Amino acid sequence: MAKGRELKGRIKTTENTRKITRTMEMVATAKMKRALDRVTSARPYANALSEVLSSLYSPDLAERFPLLRQPEQERRAALILLTADRGLCGGFNSNLIREARNQLARLRASGVDVELHIEGRRGVGYFRYVGEALTTVVTGISEKPTADNAREIIDGIMSRFMSGELDAVYVVSAQFKSALSTPPATQKILPVAPPQRKGGAPDYILAPSADEILSDLLPLYVRNQLYRALVETAAGEQGARRTAMKSATDNAGEMLNVLRRTYNRTRQAAITQEIAEIVGGAAALE
Amino acid sequence: MLKVSVISPEKVLFEGEVESLVAPAFDGEVGILTSHAPMMTLLGKGTLRLAGSAGSYQVEGGFLQVVDNNVRVVTERAEKL
């Protein structure tokens, strides 16, 4: 029964693996729920900010604010890549890395000097491996990013954009369409593309002045864009993990069916053979 | 009554009706009562006090917007006291 015991071992390991993947699936589902709550509760702030910005913005202001500066030519750009800290979430991280590589190649082909800022161990690991120089490395926040995390990442970059050292800032992050679909996307967060105005704004008393309010709120808007990218990537990671673990669990189930069937067949074959041998032996004695 | 919402980047901390409020504007405190003219002002660092049982919040930066008895306090950092 050597084959039988071997099969039994494989059944056991597959069962154990399925136990792990099923647990991971459930954990990811719970975490995704919480991450999605964070995405939803970030919305009112973003809406309020863009509403106010659009009501204060007028095209002639653009020249006076460094954050709205539209450089004629991009020479130096920053690429911020957001990935997860952990793997086992299907193609989630590799999709993000591929998108970042495409953007990198596209920018470099048009003669732009690109520097990389990476959040998440997976992205950091890959770009270190291919020997890219990383300007900023942030890890350990991908599961539960806060607005302060976003501020820490973007503030240095933002002031360098304002001083003219950088001409554009891109963010590569995941969109959360559903747990099944978390495609990567690239967003240009600097120079700021002001939200379009919808309808006339009421005649506000502005204190101190439109200019000062705008120059205070623009950095907030930029920070918030990164924050939203962070929380959406966090939700995407859990969604992708849930999907990956669900199919792993399903596959383990299918594999178990096949293994059990083979095991029973060999067991039966062995019994049949034993009976045949006994009957044969008894017949030889008569 | 004023409809007030206190919003931070991470979540909405308060939403409801209050009689009046006092907010820390960039140049000193500003009090808002019903039928206030539309106003937008930058916030400094300080305590936002809502009348009645709505409580107080520590806020820092951001802005306050008043339109038609709707008050929105949008701040970078907010903490319930």
Image: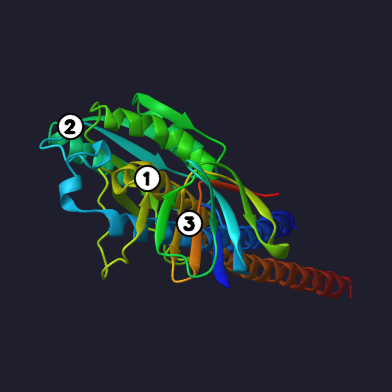
Residue A112 has which mark? 2
Query: Relative to residue B40, is residue A246 drawn left or right?
Result: right
**Could you tell me which chain the residue with mark 1 belongs to?**
A
Judged from the image, the secondary structure of the residue bearing numbered disc 2 is loop
Kind of element beneath mark 1: loop
Q: CA distance from mark 1 to mark 2?
A: 39 Å
Residue indicated by mark 3: A236
Parent chain of label 2: A
Which amino acid lies under the numbered mark 3 shown in the image of this protein? Gly
Give the answer, above or below, for where B73 lies relative to A123. below
Horizontal and vertical percent position of residue B55: 70, 57
Residue that mark 1 sits on: A208
The answer to the question of whether label 3 and label 2 lie on touching residues, with beta carbons closer than 8 A, is no
Quadrant where the N terminus of chain B is found in the figure: bottom right
Q: Sequence order check: which comes first, mark 1 or mark 2?
A: 2
Viewed as shown, does residue A180 lie left or right of A79? right
Residue A133, image x, y percentages: 35, 24
Q: Amino acid at mark 1?
A: Pro
Neighbour tally class for label 1: few under 14, some 14-19, many 20 plus, Cα within 10 Å: some
* Residue at figure coordinates x 25%, y 61% from the top left: A196
